[in-house]
Amino acid sequence: MIALIENICIYKKAWITEDEMAELTVLAESTPGPIAINAATYVGHLRGGFWGALAATLGVVLPSLAVILAVSLFLDGLMEIKAVKSAFAGIRIAVGVIIISAAVNMFSKMKKTVLNIVIFAVSFAALLAINAFSLNLSTLVMMLIAGVVGLIAFALSRRKGGAQ
Amino acid sequence: MTLLQLFLAFLKVGAFTFGGAYAAIPLIRETVLSYGWMIDDKLSQMIAVSETTPGPIMVNIATYVGVFKAGFLGALIATFAVILPAFVIILLLVTVLKKFRGNAYVEAALGAVKPCVIGIILAVGVYMTAENVLGLEVGLSSVSFDRSAALIAAAAAAMLTGYKAAFKKRLSPIAVIIVCAGLGMLVYGV
């Protein structure tokens, strides 16, 4: 995704500079929401203000909307066919493994501080338990707790640094 | 009512997903399961379709869940809701909130959310795989090992890790999905 944006916005259209692209990458990854939407809004605003942002965002959403609407029209009918059903039985298994692999990939890029590893391990174990025993705790609450822990750890380390 | 629920649910997904599409999957899953909109089976199908069609995966899933629950209008509303927070936040950050960027406290909080999200994604992947392979049910009440599913899961894992080891980059999920579709037809019959 980022590579495609880079290719179009810097080299083909010269809408943004490489510095702006670097800023865009940081912004897109540290703000919530789909990265493509963050990027489209940023580039659109840079080149055309609010309306530019709106136009770029709509542009990036429309293909998704059209393709998925089209797929949903005929896919449920196709699910009646045994071959399609079997194919999706295989695909369902692939999806679980792909999600694991994405997580492993993100973990290998994560900074391995003690705090990070503890937060990772606790979150993993907690969500497994929540799923297995269908407990009622939202992942949002877990993310919030992690954020607060991060803040406290940062404030403590700052204080320690200041005292020396 | 469903439209309002769709709007609120995907507004939440759009507002609290940090770090790309995979981070959205646990939240989307939690939401659709809690409303009873669909089961893991249907959700896996939607994730796979969203991976193999162009466009941001999160937007694709929102559109798909929306059209599944409430037709064309549902698709529009869910899609609008999932992109709204990203749109508003970026506009605010590049205009009025410039000073918040690079704030050390904000970064410390976000930095700690990241490992939490990775743990959550891993847990969802592991649980979904366990559901498929072990036929898990809530409360671990029933376990039945599905050998065909285990074989397909092993094949998918071997493809992903083998490719990474050989070419030092991630294999496109689309390739894994296509191969596993073929394996599914082979194992479960056509």
Image (cartoon, rainbow, N blue to C red):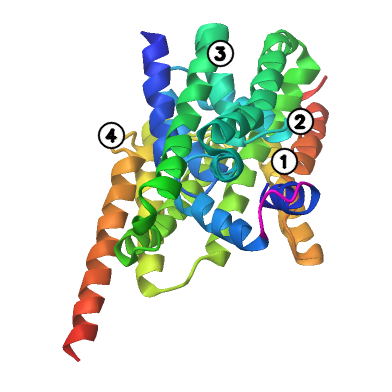
| Residue at position x 66%, y 53% in the image | A16
**Label 3: which residue?**
B68
**For residue B152, which numbered disc appears in the image?**
1
The amino acid beneath tag 2 is Gly
Q: Secondary structure at mark 2?
A: helix
Mark 1–mark 3 Cα distance, whole angstroms, equals 28 Å
Earlier sequence position, callout 2 versus callout 1? 1
State which mark lies toward you, 4 or 1.
4
Q: Secondary structure at mark 3?
A: helix
From the top left corner, tell me how far across and down residue A13 is, in percent.
76, 46
State which mark lies toward you, 4 or 2.
4
Instruction: Tell me if residue B54 comes above or below residue A84 in the rendering.
Output: below
Mark 2–mark 1 Cα distance, whole angstroms, equals 8 Å
User: Does any portion of residue A111 appear in the rendered image?
Assistant: yes
From the top left corner, tell me how far across and down residue B24 is, in percent.
49, 39
User: B96 or A116, which is in the foreground?
Assistant: B96
The amino acid beneath tag 4 is Asn
Contact check, label 4 and label 2, Cβ < 8 Å = no
Q: Residues within 10 Å of mark 1 (few under 14, many from 20)?
A: many
Q: Are marks 2 and 1 on the same chain?
A: yes
Name the subunit of mark 2. Answer: B
Contact check, label 1 and label 3, Cβ < 8 Å = no
Instruction: Tell me if residue A133 comes above or below residue A62 in the rendering.
Output: below
Q: Residues within 10 Å of mark 4 (few under 14, many from 20)?
A: few
Mark 4–mark 1 Cα distance, whole angstroms, equals 32 Å
From the top left corner, tell me how far across and down residue A145 is, in percent.
26, 52
Contact check, label 2 and label 1, Cβ < 8 Å = yes
State which mark lies toward you, 3 or 2.
3
Q: In the displayed image of the protein, which residue is found farthest to the left?
A: A163
